[in-house]
Image (cartoon, rainbow, N blue to C red):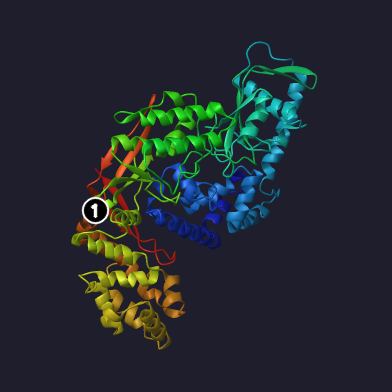
Amino acid sequence: MHKELRPEQVDILVGSPAVNDEFSKKVRELDRRLQVNGMSYRDWEVLNDRQQDIFSNDMFLDGECATSIKDYVHGAVNSCGCPDTVEDLHHHSPVLMKEIEKQQDMLPDIKIKIGENLKGLNGMIDTLLEQVLSEQEPPAGELTPEQATRNLEVYVVMSVFKKTKLSDLIQGSANNPRGGRHIRAKVDGDLKAVTAFFKKVGLKLLEWDGYKLSGSFPEYALQATKDIPFDYQGKKYSVPKGTVVPYINPTAKSRTDVGAEITFEQKELTPDNLGLSAQTYDSAQALVQATTAAIDKKYADRPEVSKPLKDLLEDAINAKGNRIDLRDALVFGRADLATISKDFGEILAAIWSYGNLEFEKVEFPSASNEPLIDFYGLKEAGGGGFDSTPVSVKSGATGGKVSINNIIEALAKQSGGKENIDNNAEYAMDVFKTVQQPMKSGMIELHKLLNEGKGSKIINDLSKTIKVPVADMDLKSVTEWSKKAFEDGSLEDLIAKQWYKTLKHGTIKDKSTYERTFRDGQDPRRSIISPLGENIYRLLNADQRMQDSLTSLARQVVLIQAKVDVKKAFMTFRVDNFSEAKFEFGWAGYSGGNKLGYKMDFKK
């Protein structure tokens, strides 16, 4: 769609206040999602494509569109114009779409609604193609790759789906990075049914690993499993074995990982989906039996799937050292091996841990989305109880971000529901408990915690300015004071002209925000809460006592990350005991309503 608008029109969209406001609101929501997982929007460009797609789902076409306002606009104007893409844009970006259509209406010669341009172009190509195909004799000798691909398109559209024009099912453009040329046709049923449908006509359903096709549906490819002869307008043609075309099934519900032939859906093999969560298993044999029963039930009519998975369970229980023989799983494609590594690997790691980490029991958490902790290893302790060791299973060579909430929960689990921390860690624990409060009250309470409970210099200076003792300062008192100060005309003098002079960071400098806060009286307490938030994360990051306390807190937990890598014919486990951790606090700002954010990265 980018070519529909002149460059200056695109620039107008990038500078549109309404579009910028829509983008800003989305970024705030995006940051909120990231904060919940121990990250922030500042980390956006270092996340991988898969992570970006997950967090930006239902707000942006793809992760790249969330990078900047320019990418946000260009992502829409340069999209493929496919029906589902246009529908998605109208759903999650109504302001941007409205402004795009305004600019399109200003074009002097033609007015093209989004999605119509490529349809017209495809129609013209179809007419030319049909003329060429009807006039030429079947090609002698080997077809070029382009001819083979086009023959397969014609075969699928005309022979399989019984359409009269390519443009009925062909969408996108091969030169467009957002929504390249592909066949888009509905086939009802689950993934197994869709695979069987194409198998009957000599096609194999694979996962597509080329240019982007869709932001909403799984991306597939159709591959000819044999030479396919077909007739078109009285002529005989053929599709060579192995020819591939990209394909979208708008009703498909399966995963979108890039790989080989598809067997497993995303998360299909997790403990939760196999019914193992919220259960404790007294032995490796008990866990193997429960998993075997779940596999037999789930794949009752598919022994080609169930047998290799059950063989892996036996391989895990008999494994010696740090690896499991993976040869029984090599009947699956590369993408399925990745799923086995990521999802089924949690179960295999738990089985493996009995003999190699000397766990007496294994417990899977009840929350399937509990971050970091995949299972708990239990060892008998004095008094008839059990010590609990949290275990995180990460697929690949690196682990993920760690949430401090899991550390706190693990501490409680390890000590029978009571937090067992030493004195050095109490300071950090107090901070993290305070962070759980709502944002506005939390910022005040965090400043009061500093300086051994005497409060930060910033909040003490504020106390002198507004004549409210630090001990008595809370959200209610700050709200009441700021409202009264605005009404009597002293808010700007006392806060902006006096207290702000004592601050190095966080004063309200944006002209429109300043006007709304100090001149219009819209949420006057923002004049205080916002600077408190902008300064607290800097103070905590610079506080050596806090860093020492955080390190002490981390050392209270014996955290094992079993990292699963599929290498050749083995699944390899590596156990890491972490003794040092780097903590960093951050804040996304007042407007988003976010609490103080933090992330914790382990270092060996």
Please state, as top left, top right, bottom left or bottom right, where the N terminus lies in the image: top right
The residue carrying mark 1 is: 556
Q: In this view, does 216 lie to the left or right of 374?
A: right
The vertical placement of 152 against 73, above or below, is: above
Q: Nearer the viewer, residue 427 or 519?
A: 427
The vertical placement of 279 against 488, above or below, is: above
Count neighbours of disc 1 (C-alpha within 10 A) and say few if under 14, some if 14 to 19, many if 20 or more. some
Q: In which quarter of the image is residue 519?
A: bottom left
Residue 134 can be seen in this image? yes
- Residue at coordinates 27% horizontally, 73% vertically from top-left? 448
Q: What element carries label 1?
A: loop
Q: Quadrant of residue 407?
A: bottom left
Please state, as top left, top right, bottom left or bottom right, where the C terminus lies in the image: top left
Q: Is residue 377 left or right of residue 185?
A: left
The vertical placement of 459 against 394, above or below, is: below
Q: Is residue 262 left or right of residue 126?
A: left
Q: Nearer the viewer, residue 454 or 485?
A: 454
Q: Position of residue 304 (x, y in %)?
A: 54, 26
- Residue at coordinates 48% horizontally, 27% vertically from top-left? 308
Q: Where is residue 578 in the image (x, y as percent from the top left)?
A: 25, 45
Q: How many marks?
A: 1
Q: Nearer the viewer, residue 192 or 335?
A: 192
Instruction: Give amino acid for label 1.
Output: Gln
Residue 348 can be seen in this image? no
Q: Position of residue 132 (x, y in %)?
A: 74, 23
